[in-house]
Image: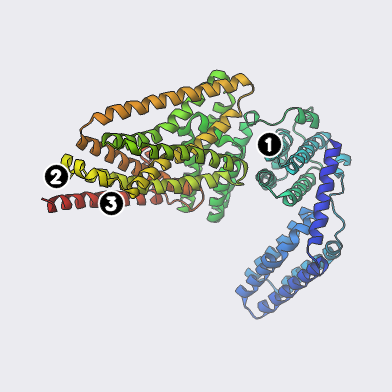
Amino acid sequence: MVLLRFFRNFLCLFIFFSFFSINANATDDYAQWVKEIESRLDKTVALYQQNQIDDARTEVQMAYFEIFENLEGPIRINFSAQKSYQMEATFGEIRKMIGENQPLSEIQTKINGLKAEMQEVLPALSAGHQLNADGQHEVYNHDEIALHWQQSFKTIDDLLAQAISAYEKKDFITAKKLAQQAQYDGYKNSEMEMSIRTNRSAAISSAINQQFYNLIKLSEQPNKMNELGYQTTVLLQDIEEQLPNLPTTRKTQAITAQSAVENPINESQQDWKEVSAEINQRIQQAITLFEKGENKKAMLSVQDTYFDVFENSGMENKIGARDSNFKAELESYFTKLVGLIKANSNKEKIQEQANLLNQALTKAVDMLQTDNTGGWILFIASFTIILREGLEALLIVAAIVTYLVKNNHQNKLPVIKQSVYVALLASLITAVIFKLVFANSGASRELLEGFTMLIAVVMLFMMSYWLLSKVEAKNWKRYLESKLSTVLTTGSLVGLWLTSFLAVYREGAETVLFYFALASDATNMLDYLYLLGGFILGTVILIVCYFIMRYTVVRLPLKPFFMFTGCFMYLMAFIFAGKAILELVEGKLFEPTLLSNVPEISWLGIYPYVETIIPQIFLIIAAIFAWWYMKYESKKSV
């Protein structure tokens, strides 16, 4: 383990030296950046003297955003994160002083101090020395750091070293699990997180957690070795700065690196109470931002909590694999919080929604931690997943197949079968890509599902209109017998193919991800057999349902058949329209506008947001117009 840690630190050291040598004239760059900042600060003073307050504030602001941000990373590495934060804060202090019209002499003094600090750090930046990543952390020989925290830090250090080693071998799954284990075993379960939150600040504790989440995301992406090494060392430095004189909360507890190695992380072993506590903590931070009037930051904080904690910890998929309705309920709390913040609602309503989320999370923790995931539990969960996720797609595909059979177009059935096979393959590929590659798989998945459903809405509405239009045709049976051979043109077949494909694809990728989550609960071959058995039984029942529909609905007279199938497809289009927009909202494409008096009827796709209701209103208007147009055409043909 010492060798692994030495390798990791050596690798990071190499990366940092490479970072300084990539730019051909690194020394000149640092000197030029410092000179440019000083020039802008001097201009700030001149503008302030001329009473151009807004321009002066903008100038110092741009000095930070356009130039100083280039120096933040090197300062963190060569000195400390605290030094970087202090210098960053000084820019904000100067801007605040200008806004408060403080005396020019005081502003000049503050600017001179910042310029002196930059001249102080410049030699170290230019020479590229004083790197803290020297192969041995001082934490292990620090008298003011408790032995318990030294052992906890060693757990984090060793596991991150292993994560980098796994990443170098392109074993991204193991790298991610090791990074997660470093966070939970070394930081959370050791109670380091709680002690830092209590004795330092909640903001510092949350910032360290965010750094862990960023590392976990990076570990899933290829070709990020430099960034992974850099962020790992920065994270370790930031933790190390908090440990001197940090009180311990467990006097006799000691976590060793060896126990961490012998017990590699499994998502089912995670402390879901810790995940729940982290979500609640971050939601309260978002409410604090809202109270300060920073609504945009508060909304982003809620959305980031959903993806960085609820989704990235695996809790979302774990719950979804057991109860998809409960998963949707939990998601709705996050969305409603964003909607309430956007509407600038009062704090009591927002806090009430946060409390409901907290209660639901408590229920979720009980569900996950009391579930021993025995064989029969895996069997039932597996059976439920395939049955509930497959039934909706099955109904649409069966309606299309029944239509073709009923109208003597059995020769077109291979086209629909092909669409189902392609959709299943595409679902599997998409799920694997989300699992292994995408850094923000939750947001990406929500957006993909949302856009897929929007396309499905168009296709289903077109199919619905096409079918219902046949109900109004005079002498419809004779009409069908004479015209049906030309009705199924290439365009019609493409429409049927796409409708079938989208019905299967929109459910397929999520189903595969649920099975990934469920499979992580299996501990032996027998568990996998139970899981497979549930899948097979659920598939058999779906097939039985398919044949029941295929051989019962086909016996209906044509007019009721067209009416039933057309109305069913319109209903699915209506439901998909609401759900599609909700997926885009949850994917952070835009923030929802809450309608407080509108009820949520999720099985109909009705949600209390302007954005989800607008497309459904358009569909109702389109249906009314289509009905009027069909009546008009029917009268004209008389």
- Name the residue: 27% across, 31% down: 554
Residue topped by disc 2: 474
Residue 95 location (% of width, % of height)? 66, 67
Q: CA distance from mark 2 to mark 3?
A: 23 Å
Query: Can residue 608 be seen in this snapshot?
Result: no
Q: Are marks 1 and 3 in contact (CB under 8 Å)?
A: no
Position of residue 468 relative to residue 56, above or below, is above
- Between label 1 and label 2, give the one nearer the viewer: 2
Q: What's under tag 2, amino acid-wise?
A: Lys
In the image: residue 299, left or right of residue 160: left
Label 1 or label 3, whichever comes before in sequence order: 1
Q: Secondary structure at mark 1?
A: helix
Q: Which residue is mark 1?
A: 177
Q: Amino acid at mark 3?
A: Ala
Q: Earlier in the sequence, mark 1 or mark 2?
A: 1
Toward the bottom, the furthest residue is 50
Category of crowding for the residue at label 2, using alpha-carbon neighbours closer than 10 angstroms: few (below 14), some (14–19), many (at least 20): few
Tell me the quarter of the picture where residue 243 sits: top right
Task: Tell me the residue that label 3 is attached to.
Answer: 622
Q: Residue at x 27, y 30 (%)?
A: 553
Q: Nearer the viewer, mark 2 or mark 3?
A: 2
Vertical comparison of 406 with 300: above or below: above
- x, y percentage for residue 616? 34, 48
Q: Amino acid at mark 1?
A: Lys
Q: Earlier in the sequence, mark 2 or mark 3?
A: 2
Contact flag, marks 1 and 2 (Cβ < 8 Å): no
Element at badge 2?
Answer: loop
Which numbered circle lies on residue 46? none
Q: Is residue 468 visible?
A: yes
Q: Check the picture and name the quadrant holding the N terminus.
A: top right
Give the crowd class for mark 3: few <14, some 14-19, many >=20 residues within 10 Å.
some
Residue closer to the observer: 57 or 31? 31
